[in-house]
Every structure is written in C-alpha cells, then in structure tokens.
C-alpha cells in the first residue's frame, strides 16, 4: 500500500460564534484556505486534483460545498470531488478518505479538509408553522 502524506496544511482563523468572522460563509472560509494552498504551492497539478470536503450544515446556498469552494478559489468546473457530513468529525473524515484514496492508488493528490460557519448555519425549528412564541425555552 502506498503512503499518504499531508503536504501543505492550511487553515483559516477560528472565531467565536457571532464574532468577527460571522459575516463569512463556510464557502468563503473554505475558498480562502484553498487560495492559500494554491499560492503556497504554485502548482498547476493542484488544479486537477480530487476533492473531499467536510461540512456539517449544508443548505440551499451551498448544497455541494466542495464545488462552491473549488469554484470560488478559481479551480476549473471539471474538478471532481465529494462532500462528507459527519457532524463534528466531517473535516477529519474527509482527510481520512483522502488518505485512503492515495493509499489505494485511486488518486495521487487530494485536497481535503472541512469548512463551517456556525454563525451562518440555518436556524431550524419544527414548531414555527404552529405559531411558536419568542423568548427563552428550556
């Protein structure tokens, strides 16, 4: 089995819920990290690689977050990829899938990781249609 190696780890700043990064979407944060990878490596090979991106709060704004991130980072529309939702372990699961792809020879190079913006995650309630009242609920 081939060895899988993490070559260019990049991350965005981490903010608190409702903090300084609250206006940034998960797609924007992910694209920022990928542009950092592209700038660091200067590699055109990265542009034709496979993607695996974790995101635990997909919505209709970015239903395929890896595609949104790839396009916003300037990668071609032909870039293949997949999205993983494993709640708090989505980014790590993406890295594990990427390692397996390299180890088995399915891919030579994979961009993997996770992106999230809890400040922008959709707020969900099954009670709103029945006239839920505002205020604190425990």
Image (cartoon, grey):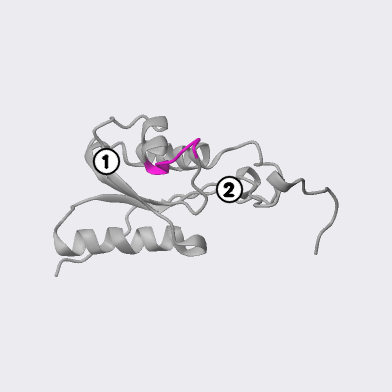
Residue 26 screen position, x and y as percent:
52, 42
Residue beneath the point at 16% across and 63% down: 104
Quadrant containing the C terminus is bottom right
Magenta stretch prevailing secondary structure: loop
Residue 5 visible to an observer of this rendering: no
Q: Is residue 41 magenta?
A: no
Residue indicated by mark 2: 13
* Left-right relation of 108 to 96: left
Does dot 1 land on a helix, a strand or a loop? Answer: helix
Furthest toward the right, the residue is: 135
Asked whether disc 1 touches disc 2, contact meaning CB atoms under 8 Å apart, the reply is: no
Above or below residue 125? Residue 1 is: below
Residue beneath the point at 50% across and 35% down: 61
> Which contiguous range is marked in magenta?
60-66
Between 36 and 118, the one nearer to me in the picture: 118
Mark 1 neighbour class, 10 Å CA radius: few under 14, some 14 to 19, many 20 or more: some
* Left-right relation of 107 to 72: left
Residue 73 visible to an observer of this rendering: yes
Residue 5 screen position, x and y as percent:
28, 61
Residue 20 screen position, x and y as percent:
70, 42
Residue indicated by mark 1: 46
Above or below residue 132? Residue 32 is: above
């Amino acid at each position: 089995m081939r060895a899988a190696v993490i070559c260019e780890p990049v991350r965005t700043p981490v903010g608190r819920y409702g903090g300084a990064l609250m206006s940034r979407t998960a797609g924007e944060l992910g694209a920022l990290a990928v542009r950092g990878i592209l700038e660091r490596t200067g590699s055109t090979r990265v542009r034709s690689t496979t993607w695996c991106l974790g995101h635990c709060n997909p919505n209709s704004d970015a239903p395929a977050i890896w595609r949104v991130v790839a396009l916003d980072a300037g990668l071609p529309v032909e870039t293949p990829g997949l999205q993983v939702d494993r709640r708090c372990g989505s980014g790590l699961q993406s890295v594990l899938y990427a390692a397996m792809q390299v180890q088995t020879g399915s891919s030579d190079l994979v961009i993997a990781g996770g992106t999230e913006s809890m400040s922008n995650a959709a707020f969900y309630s099954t009670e709103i249609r029945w006239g839920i009242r505002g205020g604190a609920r425990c």
